[in-house]
Image (cartoon, rainbow, N blue to C red):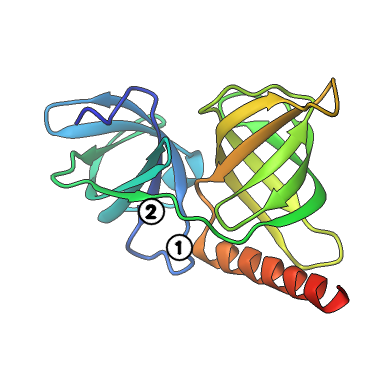
Amino acid sequence: MSAFQQYLPVQIFPKENNPEGHKFQGILEAMESNRMKIKIDRTFLSQNHSGSILVEFSMSNYNFQFESSLLSETEGEFIFILKPRVIHKSQIRKSPRLKTFIKFNFTLWTEGGRYDGAITDISTVGIKMTSEKEILKNTILSLNVFIPGTSLRFICQGLVMWCRPDPNQNHLFLSGIKFTTLSIDAMKKVDKFIQDQLRMEVDNS
């Protein structure tokens, strides 16, 4: 269980009554003898989920996933789940990326305040963005993205994989963000948008 560290960002995927494939952001608070204590998005609590779940988290260039069950006990913003017996590891897959410039806003999941940013490339796995905000690695962001001229809009959480000064703009920072709670339905829409835009670029070249 050495992969589990306090305050590790995790994603909870309910397997029951979840046809759109929604994921919910959480943070590991504590490991106990046979269960895990997780601070969870309040939306999850309001929907009264129960039963089997999938739990996902990322470290370095790898995704980890295990099956678990929700326990009936809650404590404020905290839920409890069974500790896993088996953890599956896979490399984060690469997917087509679209260079773009899309203005959007984001918040830090654990803090107040809203910040402006711009997406400079996007894939179904995540985005590269630029903003005036320097963000620490492993920070969780809440992303609110709407692409003008399309019906594509998605709101999800993302994990900061890296952040560094923009070499071309002294007052800006570049960050790489991995989507953590992008639903299956939203992922399909993002993929369609990327494929359509890439196809248009080929047709116009």
Residue 143, percent from left and from top: 66, 43
Q: Is residue 46 visible?
A: no
Q: Nearer the viewer, residue 134 or 16?
A: 134
Amino acid type at mark 1: Gly
Q: In the current view of this chain or complex, which residue is farthest to the bottom? A: 203
Residue 173, placed above or below residue 58: above
In the rendered structure, find residue 13 and report the number of the disc placed on it.
Answer: 2
- How far, Cα to Cα, is label 1 from label 2? 7 Å
For marks 1 and 2, the one nearer the N-term is 2
Confirm whether residue 82 shows in the render. Answer: yes
- Residue at 75% from the left image edge and 54% from the top image edge: 99
Percent across and percent down for residue 105 are 76, 39
Q: Residue at x 55, y 28 (%)?
A: 139
- Report the residue at 75% width, 75% height from top: 199
Judge left or right: residue 123 versus residue 22: right
Q: Quadrant of residue 9?
A: top left
Q: Please provide percent x and percent y for residue 188.
A: 57, 69
Disc on res. 21: 1
Q: Are marks 1 and 2 in contact (CB under 8 Å)?
A: yes
Around disc 1, counting alpha carbons within 10 Å, would you say few (fewer than 14), some (14 to 19), or many (20 or more)?
some
Quadrant housing the C terminus: bottom right
Q: Could you say which quadrant of the image residue 2 lies in?
A: top left
Q: Count all numbered tags in the image, as a single digit.
A: 2
- Image: 166 above or below 67: above
